[in-house]
Amino acid sequence: MISLTINGQTLEVPEGSTVLQAVNTLGITIPTLCYHKDLTPYGGCRLCVVEVEGARLPMTSCTLPVSPGLVVRTETDTVIRYRRAILRLLFTNYYDAAYTRTDGKFDLDYESELAHWAEVYDIDIRSHMAKQPRYPVDSDPNPFVWVDMNKCIQCTRCVRACAEVQGRFVWSQSFRGYQARIVAGADTTMLQARCESCGACVAYCPTGALNNKTSVSAGRADRMVQTTCAYCGVGCQFDLNIKDDVPGGRVLRVTSHTNGGRPAVNGMHLCVKGRYGYEFIHDERRLTRPRVRKYLLDGLDRPKDRGKWVDVDWPTALDIAAKGLLKVHQEHGGQAIGVLASGKCLNEENYLLNKLVRQVLGSNHIDCGSHAHFSSVVDGLEETVGLTAMSNSFDDIAQQARSLLVIGSNLTEQHPVFGARLRQAILRRKLKMIVASPDFVNIAEYAALPLYHRPSTEAALVKGLMHIILEKGWADENVIAQHQLGFAGFKAALDAYTPARVSEMTGLSEDALYQAAEILASNRPTAVIWSVGLADPVTGRDSVRSLANLQMLLGNLDVSGGGVNPLRSQNNIQGACDVGALPGMLPGYQKVSDADARRKFEQAWGVSLPGEAGLDAARMLAAAGRGEIKALYIINDDIVGAADNGIGTRRSLEACELIVLQEILPSDTTRYADVLLPGVSFAEKSGTFTSAERRIQMVNQAIQPVGQARPDWQIVVDLAQHILAANGRRLEQADFAAWNYADTAQIMAEIAALAPIYAGVSHERLANGERLQWPVESPEHPGTPLLHSGAFSRGVIKWAPVEQV
Amino acid sequence: MYQIVSAISEGRGTPESLNELQILGQDMELLSNCGLGQTASTAVRDILKHFRAEVEQHIYDRICPAGVCKIPPLAPAELSANAQLHEENIQ
């Protein structure tokens, strides 16, 4: 600790901190423009100057390290005069047409730190700014970033943000003297300079020189609502900017969440999807009224093309849906109804769907819609480590891993914020990355060793690596000693995967295989990361099992910076699985075949539950094609559009007697629906999402539902009540038998009571900013960032059988 | 600074310009990051130190004694008004 004096106050700060950081701990504000806490200090704008006793010149506090006995004054008359001089100088090359308006309104419609400090230091921007612009406004064709270099003060925050946050190095400084300016690439357009349009430069720009093109003239927001992004499994936090000029409010734009200082997974970073992909919320094609096919209203038989849509009110639509489902139930039993839950919906909604299927319909035919195609990404994990989730956290991998094996994942496009984070880890910590993929993926640019193998040979590749590791004696002896059970068979099975044979299968050279094995063996811990690239219906499961085996072999499974890390595709597919939207699992991964688990839910819901696992999504669709499943209830999933087997899926849906679809936008699947219930987007409801790293995060309602659309959980509740009423069925008295919920917090309380891994989760804790990663065993439990810590000693992890190909 | 000096050489200088140049020069020396910035204003400040009269002639009399700057001539009435201003400033 170093002791120094600031404005007469003596304080102690850690060695290596800057004067600015020390000053901030006292709650004193120093004006800054080029400084940002996320970026390397630059000292270019000079606005943060302070007087330092004994120094010849005023010093910039953002770059001055503390030293013992330093005497600093931050607010003397001289310092203030300096800051005003600096601001005046900055404005000589600044031009904003907003200040030339003749109507006397000079309120900027964007956030500008520069304008803020000008106001604080009483600088009249109009009289000090340049007399005419030097650059064209909106000078770059990038579809998302709006560039006006007239407002640039060359603080280089955009340059540093692009380099230090996104790792893309688009912006740089160029030219000299009066001509000096910020350019993209070699003074070309941003996209030519390989911009990924993440908007980090916009988020960090303090003057409005870089702005969001999609909302540049939309004006300022009336309020901000922090929420969780609904695109991928990273679970970024951001602020929805809301304008209340229409009833219910509307979303103006998305901005990085800056205040509050809660540790979010993404900091201020977002990707192009999260920052700019919000326009669907107010898309004019949004489904705003419930619809049913005309034949249902008329009581006729279904025409081949299902006939015309008719807009109806909610009671009619729910009644038709409930009676239709009930009819199938009465004629063919609960086994003839399938429910496809959604990885895009809230945990609470998926829980209700699971309750609807198991309690009201009496079957286990529930699965996530996307599992029709991608379930093998995690299935293999269940057989080895037991839990189908990322074992480590994003920050743990970025901070602790010494090498990475990225396989079957286009990381920087599928999970861009995590991809960018790993780029930084590679740049700063020099960790070694192996990227295995059939074709070039962007992250391979950063790879120490890219492996371009033949498609669907991932499993063979990993087995080949294990063979080499055993051959060279690089395996973790402790793990093998503790885990003799099944090891001999495992080892023998690998004998067939000699480097020569694997080389032949994968198309990689033997040399590359040895190199890869050596990188993994000599840079432990290794984090293995994969994504939907491994979702091969034939080899996917085997690939995932092999990766788990590899991590065991290297001793990386239960350590910080290691682990098995499937990056889930949809934002809440993890949460949907957690809360029971799986054919074989009750909420909290309690098997339906487990009589004790079943008894718990039977008592809670007041019904008896079937002990046989239901059909998964792919089998459900196949069964529908065969006419065994008569009705489908699909929530928020375009299973036709997402299908790699489009024709098969279409045929299955065509064969269904009744399809109730809950959606927000028309899709390829809506064509096959009989009843269409308009749900809402993530901006219109409150609840929780669970990100790929098992982190449960709040989704906060920002605007009222569009049109007559209703939050999905309310629709599910109403549908359940309609089915029960139409059946004249009365549920037995039990703690959680009823279907009356005031809000999603109440549903989460029910989940917490029934699913041990969510036992300590509540909306209240999440709203307080707690970082909760399941298992959260009690209201006091802090969550579990590292899933399998100590798992080996408990002996719960086992060697998976090695399939011979 | 460049803008002010350009204005003076084109005959658009004002009596306040000189003071402004002086202050700007000092601030630049104190607040610049490196030696180049700290000394960038030296030329202008030295002109003011050694040749202030000539610069003032640019402003008040609208002539360039060295014959380098091209200044449009001023009407006699404005000239005499400037002369009076100069007197006041000196006093």
Image (cartoon, coloured by chain):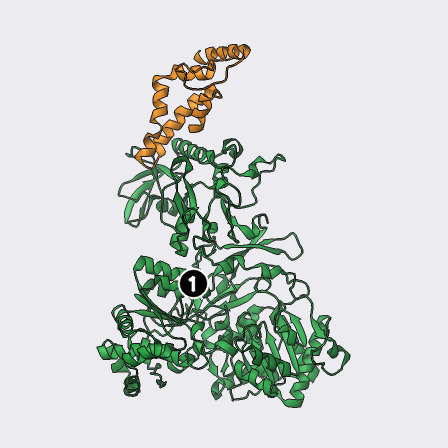
Chain colours: A green, B orange
Q: Chain of mark 1?
A: A
Indicate the position of residue A59 as horizontal and vertical percent values: 33, 37
Which one is in front, A539 or A255?
A539
Furthest residue in direction right, as rendered: A298
Does A7 appear above or below A325? above
Relative vertical location of residue A492 with respect to residue A6 in this rendering, above or below: below
Count the marks.
1
Q: At which x and y percent is residue A37?
A: 39, 50
Rendering quarter of residue A711: bottom right
Side of A317 where A111 appears, left or right = left
Circle 1 sits on which residue? Answer: A412
The structure residue drawn at horizontal position 38% and vertical position 75%, both measured from the top left corner, is A454
**Residue shown at the point (36%, 58%) measured from the top left:** A424
Packing grade of label 1 (10 A; few <14, some 14-19, many >=20) is: many
In this view, the residue in front, A152 or A45, is A152
**Residue A405: percent from the left, percent from the top?**
34, 70
Q: Is residue A363 left or right of residue B54?
A: right
Q: Amino acid at mark 1?
A: Thr
> In the rendered view of the protein, which quadrant contains the C terminus of chain A?
bottom left
**Whether residue A48 can be seen here:** yes
Single out the residue that lies furthest toward the left: A473
Front residue of A102/A56: it is A102
Q: Is residue A32 visible?
A: no
Determine the residue positioned at 64% across, 79% down: A659
Helix, strand or loop at mark 1:
helix
Residue A803's spot in the image, x, y percent?
36, 85
Q: Residue B47 occupies which quadrant of the picture? A: top left
Q: Is A415 rendered above or below residue B73?
A: below
